[in-house]
Image (cartoon, rainbow, N blue to C red):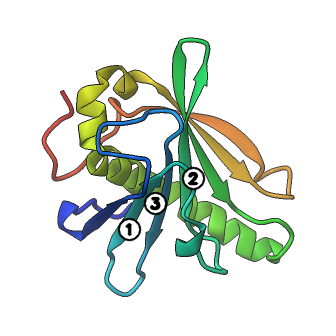
Amino acid sequence: MSTFNPDKLFVEYREGVSPTGPVFPRRYTITHSDITGELFLTIGLGYAWDKTNSMRDEVLGEWVRRGSAFYYCVYLYIDQGEFKKNEVVRRNEIFRRELPLALSAIRYGDKSLFDTSPTLDRAPIIVHFMSIYPQFNSHEDWGTFRELKIKNLPPLQ
């Protein structure tokens, strides 16, 4: 896993969303530069499809409400038939290795929302790995933001 560096994170809030709200709907798009290692977090009412590319290596996330409980759902596009199986294996490994970095960037980049709504730190993170191959198509519980191990940052309160 890469180490999260807050100096390489750039956050953009889109129209209708501020650093403190709304929680729902609130969608996150994380893209990156392989060359510079920079992360780009866009937070809006919808996903930032204009920031994605044909590689489909972005991380998408959103807050979902079920009754009075919130969940943070992550959607990872492993494949939809466009990649050969050996490439799907590699993409799955990369997403799993780098997802903690993306989750750290979300938590750090949207810290004002978490400060305003501290119960979000205890919301379950559900990750949807989307693939046509059954062994890679799954939904997994990845804990909570409170449980994240963010390197080089003070512990979450």
Specify the amino acid type for callout 1: Phe
- Can you identify the residue that label 2 sits on? 46
Asked which secondary structure carries label 2, the reply is: loop
Specify the amino acid type for callout 3: Glu
- Going by the picture, which residue comes out furthest to the front? 16
Residue 43, above or below 157: below
Asked which secondary structure carries label 1, the reply is: strand
For the residue pair 113 and 148, the one nearer the viewer reads as: 113
Mark earlier in primary sequence (2, 3): 2
Asked whether the beta carbons under mark 2 and mark 3 sit within 8 Å of each other, the answer is no
In the image, 117: left or right of 14? left
- Can you identify the residue that label 1 sits on? 40
| Label 3 crowd bin: few (<14), some (14–19), many (20+), radius 10 Å | some
For the residue pair 95 and 90, the one nearer the viewer reads as: 95
- Can you identify the residue that label 3 sits on? 98
Quadrant of the image occupied by residue 15: bottom left
Q: Quadrant of the N terminus?
A: bottom left
In three-dimensional space, the C-alpha distance between marks 1 and 3, rounded to whole angstroms, equals 14 Å
For the residue pair 64 and 125, the one nearer the viewer reads as: 64
Mark earlier in primary sequence (1, 2): 1
Label ID, residue 7: none
Q: Position of residue 41 (x, y in %)?
A: 39, 61
Residue under the point 79% across and 76% down:
83
Asked which secondary structure carries label 3, the reply is: helix
